[in-house]
Image: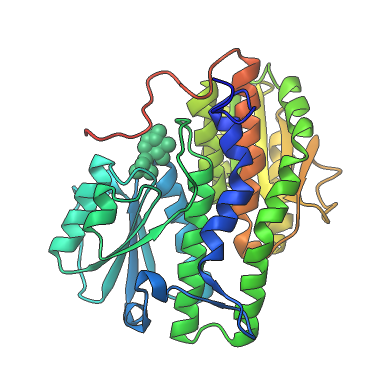
Amino acid sequence: GAAEKGGFEHFMLKEIHEQPKALTDTLRARIKNEGKKAINLEEIGFDASWAEANRVVITACGTAWHAGVIGKYAFEHFARIPVDVDIASEYRYRNPIYNPKDIFIIISQSGETADTLAAMRMAKKSGARIIAITNVVGSTLAREADLVMYTWAGPEIAVASTKAFTTQLMCLYLIAIQFGVLRGTLNDAELGAAVEALENIPAEAEKILSDKENIQRFAYLQTNKTKVFYMGRLFDYAVSLESALKLKEISYTHSEAFAAGELKHGPIALVDESTLLVAICTQDNLFDKMDSNIKEVKARGASTLVITWDDVSYFDKTADEVFRIPRTMASLSPMLAVIPAQLYAYYVSILKGLDPDKPRNLAKSVTVE
Ligand code: G6P
């Protein structure tokens, strides 16, 4: 009924709107504010011994895997530690090389995905230590891992994951930054700046939500687009993966994501007048590369949307439309940049008369292979 949806038409829209609170809840218990700002993960058992790892291996499925891809960039950036990230159904059938100093991060909203649990058990058998990031207290993953970091997102009902994803990212950023502190790759000033930026994310997310009519209006103008491509570089590439998944899941629009540098290696062959190209542009040092990619697809008749910072005018002449998100550290952009894409997918689904909460053929949790 309407009451359990908190006045929203669908669970998905409700959950998109719950992100500021979910992000705050996930963050709050893990921040120390005594004198100087710091991260406190001792409560979950993350002590200095974890930071002795030589490598971090991340495995997950679906949206949680996309969070893992962002985690890889985050660990590399903040902690300068090598990361392997793999889809759990691939990982479990490979012949992976183990190192006693590896640690594993297994991400699963439900904590019950069959492939994810199988990958976790393989890693455990090798003797590696396991960190679980999950939303469900007492789930199989939570019970079997050595250390659990909960995403305090509350129950996620809609099949398409939204608040679980952004809170998974918050957890990964907290671990990556704390790793950096323990490994000495971040100094006090850098730590303070990163924590402050994390603390501002919920209010920034709220600001994007207050702008949702713009996204709805744009979705209305794009109903004749049968192909939607998302592209970006680095963190924006990972957000592209998740954005394309959201759209295909609930609107059945053919959508794909690619690293912008790959445009000329294939995707450009598909670009025509029926294409919407969404360029996610939050990595300032790569704006010129993105700009020329956008011009290339525009020249082939695609309509173009850019998602970028609110203080950037770089793309105003190139793109047909620009969505702006509040400026944060470039390395933290995914928690904000994905929100317009979630809203866009939601509105396209509604415009097509579909039920975004219950997409055909999909399940909330894939507990059999
Ligand atoms: C299903 C859901 C996705 C989810 C994936 C992994 O495909 O529809 O939203 O990302 O499973 O689920 P998990 O519970 O392991 O995060």
Would you say residue 358 is visible in this rendering?
yes
Q: Which quarter shows the N terminus?
A: top right
Compared with 273, 54 (above or below) is below
| Position of residue 360 measured from the top left corner of the image (x, y, whole percent) | 42, 18
Closest to the observer: 310 or 162? Answer: 162
Compared with 226, 35 (above or below) is below
Compared with 239, 243 (above or below) is above
Ligand 1 quadrant in view: top left
Give residue 95's quadrant in the image: bottom left
Q: Residue at x 32, y 54 (%)?
A: 59
Give residue 49's quadrant in the image: bottom left
Q: Residue at x 67, y 43 (%)?
A: 279
Q: Which quarter shows the C terminus?
A: top left
Give the residue furthest to the front.
3
Give the residue furthest to the left.
125
Is residue 140 toward the left or the right of residue 254 in the image? left
Is residue 82 toward the left or the right of residue 201 in the image? left
| Position of residue 169 measured from the top left corner of the image (x, y, whole percent) | 51, 56
